[in-house]
Amino acid sequence: MDEKALGRRLQEARRKANLTQQELCQKAGLSYSTLAKIERGAIRSPSVFTVASIAAATGVPMEELLNVELSASSTPATVEKKRSKTGISFVYLDVNGVLVRFFHRAFSQIAKETAIGADTVETLFWRHNDAVCRGELSYADFNAFFTRELNMPSFDWKKYYMDSVEPMPGVGELVTWLSENYRLGLLTNNMPGFTHELLSTNRIPNVNYDVIIDSSEVKAIKPEDKIYEIASQRAGVEPQEILLIDDGRTNLMAADRLGWHVLWFDDYYPEESLARVRQALEF
């Protein structure tokens, strides 16, 4: 595959569809950094599922993007992925509590700077977090709220968040293994732009995810049924073929009710959790 030629064709398809890179990312469920690398030809042999998502979002036939001619009896080239003994073919990873941890330390830092109790800061945060992650409250309004409530000259939650999170120990190796053997996606409750920044700064493994479901983009949060329905549709497989790895029990139970496989990730004991993931995905 000529990655640079493919990148030019994808870029041309996006422009003909009058889509910016951010708009295409949202429609196709891709991270900005992944799309940018593909258009530059910097990703060797992009996943056929990623190309298929771009084809669907731009309305350009997949064979045209891949520059192949299909006869009536031929089929597009596919990337062989594994299926676990229990029938799992697609894995969704949560971000906070699975790929990164310790963002709660930001509450202590804010409390230290404002001389306001960390419990009060945390209460204010959770009072509005869901609305921002769901896209009902703008990120700017969220920051303005904190500026007023904490009597600060300015406030930027993203800065505190990014300064506090750290990669989950051992998860980079696991994500690489998952991307090589299974179709892989992110399913996260996050504020606008946070997931893309985590990827672009390599705070979370920046592999070629097949699907990224960001709550702020799809306007729904876990554990609401809507976000799982969107995730199922974009995964393109039956519910019983999907595994969700999440640190939230409520989120897992919602997925379980819809027929997904689920696995709880304990960020206090990541080594044990990583071992259980490997065990669940034996093939």
Image (cartoon, rainbow, N blue to C red):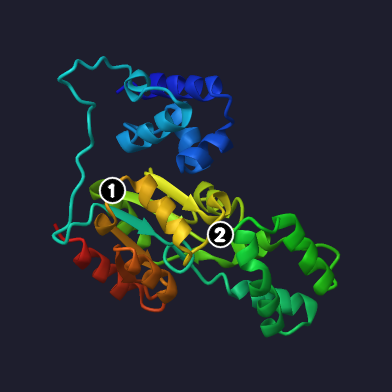
- Report if residue 278 is visible in the image: yes
CB of mark 1 within 8 Å of CB of mark 2? no
Dividing the picture into quarters, in which one does residue 3 lie? top left
Residue at horizontal 25 percent and vertical 71 percent from the top: 276
Rate crowding at label 1 as few (under 14), some (14 to 19) or many (20 or more) other CA atoms within 10 Å: some
Dividing the picture into quarters, in which one does residue 256 lie? bottom left
Give whichever of discs 1 and 2 has the lower sequence position.
2
Residue at horizontal 72 percent and vertical 85 percent from the top: 117
Residue at horizontal 53 percent and vertical 58 percent from the top: 220
Which residue was labeled with disc 2?
Answer: 190
Per the rendering, the mark at residue 237 is: 1
Q: Is residue 66 left or right of residue 124?
A: left
Give the amino acid at mark 1. Answer: Val
The number of discs equals 2
Of residues 254 and 199, the one nearer the viewer is 254
- Report if residue 207 is visible in the image: no
